[in-house]
Amino acid sequence: QVQLVESGGGLVQPGGSLRLSCAASGSIFRINAMGWYRRAPGKQRELVATITRGGSTNYADSVKGRFTISRDNARNTVYLQMNSLKPEDTAVYYCNADIWGSTTGRNFWGQGTQVTVSS
C-alpha cells in the first residue's frame, strides 16, 4: 500500500520560512513527477510547484522566487522550501506523486499539512 506523508507545516509570521517534506512509502518501483498543491479557505486547490524525476521544475507565478521544490529520489521524498511567506500563502498544502509499482501506476495524494502565515 503506497502512502504519501507530509510534514513541516505550522504557524509562521509574515516574512518567515518553512520547509515541507513529503515521503512516499510502500511498494514503489518508480516515482515520476512529484508536486505540491494548496487549498486556501474558500478557494479551489491550486498548483504550487512540480518537479520531474530528472529535476525539471515548474512554479505558480505567485510563488516564483520565494519557494523552491526539490526531491531526493533515493529517499522517495519531495521538499518545498518556502521563504518570504505572506498571509496569502495560508492554506492546506498537499503532496502529489505519480507512482509506479511493479505493473501499474497511478496518481497519489497526501493527507495535507496546514500552513498558517500570521502575525
Image (cartoon, rainbow, N blue to C red):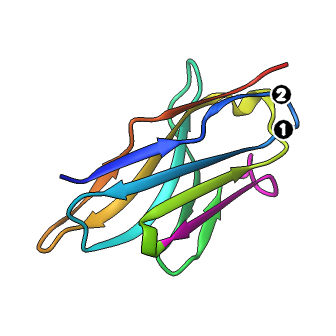
Res. 71 in view: yes
Numbered marks: total: 2
Question: Which of the numbered marks, if any, corresponds to residue 27?
Answer: none
Q: Residues within 10 Å of mark 1 (few under 14, many from 20)?
A: some
Q: Which residue is mark 2?
A: 13
As displayed, is residue 69 above or below residue 21? below
Q: Which residue is mark 1?
A: 16
Q: Secondary structure at mark 1?
A: loop
Kind of residue at badge 1: Gly
Q: Which residues are magenta?
A: 60-72
Q: Residues within 10 Å of mark 2 (few under 14, many from 20)?
A: some
Residue at left 30%, top 55%? 107
Kind of residue at badge 2: Gln
Residue 116, horizontal then vertical, whole percent: 68, 25
Q: Secondary structure at mark 2?
A: loop
Mark 1 to mark 2 CA distance (whole Å): 5 Å
Left or right of 2? Residue 17 is right
Question: Where's the C terminus, which quadrant?
Answer: top right
Left or right of 35? Residue 3 is left
Q: Quadrant of residue 100?
A: bottom left
Q: Are marks 1 and 2 in contact (CB under 8 Å)?
A: yes
Residue 13 among those drawn in magenta: no
Residue 9, horizontal then vertical, whole percent: 60, 35
Res. 60 in view: no
Residue at left 38%, top 58%? 97
